[in-house]
Image (tube, rainbow, N blue to C red):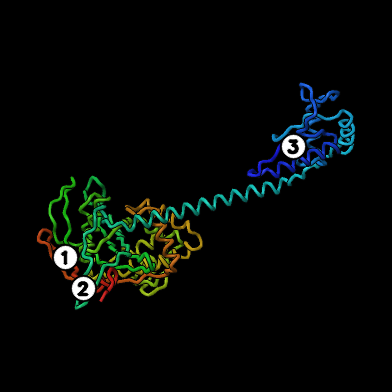
Amino acid sequence: MKKPIDPNLSNAGEEEILQDLNIKGEEGGFSSFGSNEKKSQNGLESGDKPLSLGEIMDEIDDPSLSPAIKMSHSGEKKATARSSSHHHHHSHHHHSRHSAPQKKKKEKMPIAARIAIVILLFLLSIVVIVCVAFAVMRGWGHADLMKKTDAQGEALAYHETVEYKGHTYEYNDDIFSMVFLGIDQRTMKSAKDTDFVGASDADIVVTVNTKTGESKVIAIPRDTMVDVDIWSTSGIFLRTQKTQLCLAYAYGDGGRKSCENAVASISRVLYDVPIQKYYALNLNGIAPLNDAIGGVTVNSLYALPDYGVKYGDTVTLKGDMAEAYVRTRDMDNIEASLNRTDRQIQYVNAFADQALPAVVKDFSTISRLYNTASKYSQTNISLNNATYLGSLLLSKGVTEFKTYTLEGEMQAAEDPLVPDVVFAEFYPDEDKLMEVVLDVFYTQID
């Protein structure tokens, strides 16, 4: 007799399962679940033989059985008895239908194919690592370059707006600037003979707009008169003295302090604009860098008789010839340093024209040039900075630099302490200088 079903409970599914089990019990040999027939203590009807575990599992696996029976075996209701004759009958059919199936032999992938897949995955992982590393280096390089600090790492102090000839100009915060110094140490015979650490014969400011990639170069004559901080050999500040710009490097340690002193003086020449980085290259490093990109081609602005070069010749500079071209000057001509500055600017542009295609072809050229130059240089520009700048110029399609050379007057001066020696002094035209500064570093806002 079935137990009345509570109408408030959703047990219609259970009722159907019980009915299904009763049907299977009659047809397949299982006795009814939930019947009121008398059973022995072990749960079997009298005369029934207990099932082994293997037989029970065979019955459960039989696809002909109702899903409800399989569910009942797993936890809902358990079969308690069955007739022995029905079991043997069903068992016979079960074994006849389910003989041991033949296992299909899996086809193995050829060894060559597996090796190719492994190599492909390995190469793909390298590409991913390189791309991630490049992105990280580029991000760090940009963040470091745009810090609002000077070459000494101190907060920059400068005028954000300038009033000039009835117009207002605002400093462009997207401008990154660095100083390139070409250091000449030929006067220094040895550390024992003198404490002279060299002079900056090339003083070039390079700026890059980090939004547009626009790049500009300002060549400042080495003889430009400017306030230079004078330091003792022990690093004690003594005074500020107006003298030639090239000597700012000499009043230092030949390393970081010399570079920072030169940067400070160059900033003063340019009305105290902020300059974040510096790169001081001993002119002896010109030849290795020049040859690292296969030489640099120029239309000569200077005659080099020792190399068979005449003024106006088109020549590819290689080896020592490149160093001679950017370093040599006529000591008897007071204007000689200006001609050399022109050659240096020309060489920088030509070098860039040669190097950029090499970088496009192989971006690792940047790191190779950086590592080559590191043997001859002192800098606070990291490889991350160089990577960022290189990728920026390439992504913006920059192929040339706009160049500026300061206009002014060269004068001859004598020092009573050094008789019979004439010194060259360059005084920039203040209006022309201001126009250059505004064009490079500022944006007109009215």
Q: Element at badge 3?
A: loop
Q: Element at badge 2?
A: strand
Q: List x then y, in percent, for residue 398.
A: 42, 69
Which of marks 3 and 2 precedes in the sequence? 3
Residue drawn 38% across the image and 60% down it: 320
Q: List x then y, in percent, for residue 346.
A: 35, 69
The Cα atoms of the two marked residues, 2 and 1, are separated by 19 Å
Q: Given this view, does label 1 or label 3 mark the residue nearer the observer?
A: 3
Q: In the image, what residue type sits under mark 3?
A: Lys
Q: In the image, what residue type sits under mark 1?
A: Val
Which of marks 1 and 2 precedes in the sequence? 2
Q: List x then y, in percent, for residue 146.
A: 33, 58
In the picture, residue 249 is in which quadrant? bottom left
Which of marks 3 and 1 precedes in the sequence? 3
Q: What residue does disc 2 label?
A: 408
In the picture, residue 105 is in which quadrant? top right
In the picture, residue 89 is in which quadrant? top right
Circles 2 and 3 in contact, beta carbons < 8 Å: no
* Circle number at residue 228: none
The Cα atoms of the two marked residues, 2 and 3, are separated by 116 Å
Q: Given this view, does label 2 or label 1 mark the residue nearer the observer?
A: 2
Seen in the image, is 139 located left or right of residue 95? left
* Nearest to the observer: residue 432 or residue 343: 432
Seen in the image, is 430 located left or right of residue 136? left
Residue drawn 58% across the image and 51% down it: 123
The Cα atoms of the two marked residues, 1 and 3, are separated by 127 Å
* Nearest to the observer: residue 125 or residue 384: 125
Residue drawn 19% across the image and 78% down it: 166
Q: What residue does disc 1 label?
A: 422
Q: What residue does disc 3 label?
A: 2
Say if residue 400 shows up in the picture: yes
Residue drawn 69% across the image and 40% down it: 5
